[in-house]
Image (cartoon, rainbow, N blue to C red):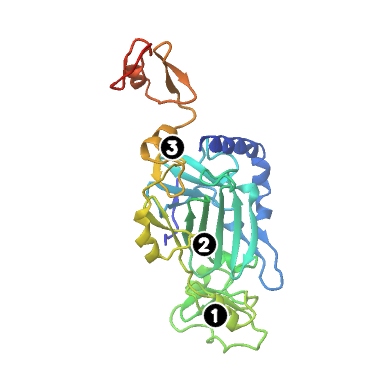
Amino acid sequence: MFLFCSSGGESTRMMGKRYLSLLGLAGLASVASSSEKCVISADGTHSAVDLNALHKSDSDYSLTSDSNPDYKYNFNLCGQTIFRDSKCTEGATVCEIKNDAALDVYGFVDTISLKWHNEALVMNMTGELQCPYNDIHPYSSAVFFYCSTETIVSIRSESIYTCNLEFEYHTPVACGGTVVHYTCRDNQCVPDPNGRFGSRDECSSACSGPSPNPPPPPPGPPDQTYICRSNFTCEAHHGGTFSNFTNCSTYCQPFQKHYSCFNNQCVQDSRGRLTFADCTAGCAKITDKWSCGPDYTCAEDAMGRFGDYDDCMLGCHNPADKLYHCNDDTGECEESDEGIENKGLCDSVCTKMESNPLIFGRQVDLE
């Protein structure tokens, strides 16, 4: 888990660029309406929550990938990223970065939607139109917000084959209400809608030595509601998510981690079907297929479309790069839709068919 920090297929990717350009036209409008997208009304079970306070105007949230330390995710909440380049453009809110350049967009501002899932408030977003590993899926991302006295941001999961990314955010803002009030309990300030302190600083000044508040009352009547704290304990709370202590205890458990195998390494993946032990035992056996990654590098992949590394290297190239093919009639290398990138290598082996009776070391019959 990371603590919060901040900082400063070929045809598939081309389609993603077209999708970006369309969203770029609507970027300003989507940013202007983002405040409404980050507010969810009270529904009788949950308090109203406004996440706009988590938007950063001077820098992005930034987390390093659990799968590869060379990659990181820059994202903002309820607004577009501060980081911009030709890929992470106007309207983007979650971008994957490598070597200070964006590779993919996992979310756009105008796709934000909020919904409750058990005790978590989930923000869902959609990014580029097609995932290079599975083109029926778009890039997508989600942030799971939990009411907490702490402020912690971490990566919840990275699903490589479906281009899905999930974050987890523990914050007092997710507790709801237009103003977060605090009460002093066991010499600690905790969010409480009925608390007498209007800010954490005010509470901290008074919350030293014996607690100025009486100890919490015993569990209330059957209609008392409960919330799940970040340490996975249930607590009576006005306007809580759960209607009784039993339901709260059932769902208030640490998350079961799931894993999948990527690049011969086990990575945490909410859609994975393996335990860590099973993944570790079988992960190294994936050696017979290769796939071309988003940054045009080849990686071992059980679902890859290339039979070996050499085939992958020939097929895995940026569509903007020139390829060269030998014309047997002229003995010259010409630009082509297929071939190799190295023109010098092409020139060194390219000769006319009729003037070369030895082809790749084998005698041929010329009639």
- Disc 1, SS: helix
- Disc 2, SS: strand
Crowding around mark 2 (Cα neighbors within 10 Å: few <14, some 14 to 19, many 20+) is many
Q: Which of marks 3 and 2 is nearer the N terminus?
A: 2
- Disc 3, SS: loop
The alpha-carbon separation of the residues under discs 1 and 2 comes to 21 Å
Crowding around mark 3 (Cα neighbors within 10 Å: few <14, some 14 to 19, many 20+) is some
| Coordinates of residue 209 in the picture (x, y in percent) | 43, 81
Q: Residue at x 41, y 15 (%)?
A: 328
| Three-letter code, disc 3 | Tyr
Q: In which quarter of the image is the C terminus?
A: top left
| Three-letter code, disc 2 | Tyr
Choose mark 1 or mark 2, whichever is in front: 1
The residue indicated by pointer 1 is: 249
Q: Residue at x 65, y 75 (%)?
A: 239
Crowding around mark 1 (Cα neighbors within 10 Å: few <14, some 14 to 19, many 20+) is some
Choose mark 3 or mark 2, whichever is in front: 3
Q: Which of the two residues, 319 or 362, is positioned nearer the viewer here?
A: 362
Tell me whether circle 1 and circle 3 mark residues in contact (CB < 8 Å). Answer: no
Q: In which quarter of the image is the N terminus?
A: bottom left
The residue indicated by pointer 2 is: 169
Q: Which of the two residues, 95 or 50, is positioned nearer the viewer here?
A: 95
Q: Which of the two residues, 154 or 131, is positioned nearer the viewer here?
A: 131
Q: Do we see residue 159 in this rendering?
A: yes
| Coordinates of residue 29 in the picture (x, y in percent) | 68, 43
Q: Earlier in the sequence, mark 1 or mark 3?
A: 1
Tag of residue 296: 3
